[in-house]
Amino acid sequence: MEESEPLLAARSEGRRLNGHFRWGTNALGSKAVEDFRRRLKYFFMNPCEKYRARGRKPWKLMLQILKIAIITVQLVSFGLSNEMMVTFKEENLMTFRHLFLKGYKDHWRGSYALYAKTDVYDHIHYIINRYTILHNLTVGNLAYEKIGGEYTPLSICQVFYRNSSIDPGEDTFDIDPHVDKDCISIYPMQSLNNSLLATQRNFSLDFKRLLSVNIYLTLKTINLQTVRHQELPDCYDFHITITFDNRAHSGKINVDVENDVRIFECRDWNVEGSSGKIDSLLLSFDSVVILACFASLILCTRSVINGIQLQFEFNIFFHAYYKKIVTWSDRMEFVNGWYILIIVSDTLTIAGSALKIGIQTKFLTNYDVCSILLGTATMLVWVGVIRYFGFFKKYNILILTLRAAFPNVIRFCCCAAMIYLGYCFCGWIVLGPYHDKFRTFDKVTECLFSLINGDDMYATFLKMRNKSYMVWLFSRVYLYSFISLFVYMVLSLFIALITDTYETIKHHQKDKEPVSQLQAFIAECRDQPESGRYQTDDEPLTCCSSPCGCF
């Protein structure tokens, strides 16, 4: 089929003036071109302009404002509950360390160790003694676990190499690396003498083969502090593991206490003034949050799909009318990054709210996962508030600068990351044996990042002062070159990259020059939102001219 005269005129009149894409009068006279240009302009309007153009209520905008309020309230509510749970767990863990580790002090965290055989036996006996008379010791609501009417025992397990013959004096050894495990059980309420006798008769340690001694015990308690916050108390099972770690065979046995917690609903309870097992108000509120996020997810997904469809239409239209190829940056203009951010936030909020309901009903205890989901979702929701500042010209320059600089920033960071990782690997291998901050790879990354920000430089240099001359000299070259490269060059280039983008955006806004073919094409449309030209056949011709109407 042959093209109409207006289409041929539109194609022939398209040209570039002063480096920007322009179209002649004949192109503007084409109804197809003008209608499509008006359609594109409407697509890129903000909610207020769309309301004045067609009178449509900005439901997505109102829904996002509602979400900011209810998601923040939900996070605060969960945060208070999570804070009480974490505090209760940490304080109980500290209680177990004081109850079962002989002579334990608060400042000994992470450094409790034994060096003599008698001390190891003495501490194992001490733990058994404290466990068997726990009900007479503790000031807390701790109790033994019962299964089928029987108390669960304390288990002492030693892990050791199967067979070995080690003689350091003769520099000889013969070892079987296979690992065996031997356990004994001690039940609560046993007399101390019987416990010690059983331990001495059936439980002896071969320290040359010994890898670790693990003591397992289970205690139960109830978290009563939630009553003051109008929440039902939870029952807790603390699965405690006390580890005597001898894997290094260095003459130092590290001792640590670990605590695995199971939280569940108490079987028989009665709280004065409480009429239900589950706070129906909180559950209803969480359900409202899920419904609001689900509605927002549908609306934003539909908008993203419409934008992608319009992108393909513009690509076909642009190629058919003007024989031009649409650039990738222009095509990405149709994909609204804010909607992608909202979709991710809604997905995380729905998943986190479902977990929160499971936690409140005591079916789940994944507090950490729920915290990550809800915390990340709330962060993204509040970051999304920046989008609404973009409706005002004075604030919009920040949004435009961030968006324009983002691709260059990512490329710059990828290049800088290669140099950073090189320094990390080098510092880990060379300085790790001589400096605590370089002992592990994750510590190296944290230390170097702190140095970039100017933190603790003197202490880092000071610890390398008394090392061998070669290591001391290498550490100086290493640290001086890293600080000079990243503090004086990389950070300066990073700031210059952002500044250059800001000046470019500011220049284009001041001169009102389109910066892309898409913007130049849309700029040819002179119709204002209040003109009534954006009305469709199924919409009324009335429109609101007040900016306040969009809210």
Image: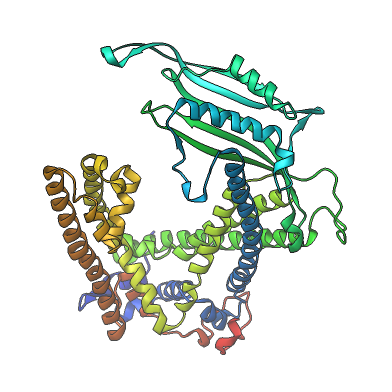
Q: Is residue 276 above or below residue 391?
A: above
Q: Can residue 325 be seen in this view?
A: no
Using residue 494 as the reference point, say whether residue 221 is left or right of it.
right
Q: Position of residue 35 (x, y in %)?
A: 45, 74
Image quarter where the C terminus lies is bottom right
Q: Where is residue 432 in the image (x, y as percent from the top left)?
A: 26, 42
Q: Residue at x 30, y 53 (%)?
A: 447
Q: Which of 410 and 153 is in front in this view?
A: 153
Q: Residue at x 79, y 45 (%)?
A: 266
Image quarter where the N terminus lies is bottom left
Q: Position of residue 466 (x, y in %)?
A: 19, 48
Asked where in the image residue 227 lies, by quadrant, the reply is bottom right
Using residue 501 as the reference point, say whether residue 542 is left or right of it.
right
Q: How many marks?
A: 0
Q: Is residue 115 above or below residue 297?
A: above
Q: Is residue 368 visible?
A: yes
Q: Colour scheme used in the picture?
A: rainbow
Q: Which residue is drawn at 31% across and 46% down?
A: 436
Q: Which of 241 and 136 is in front in this view?
A: 136
Using residue 89 as the reference point, say whether residue 400 is left or right of it.
left
Asked where in the image residue 7 lies, by quadrant, the reply is bottom left
Q: In this view, does 424 lie above or below 146?
A: below
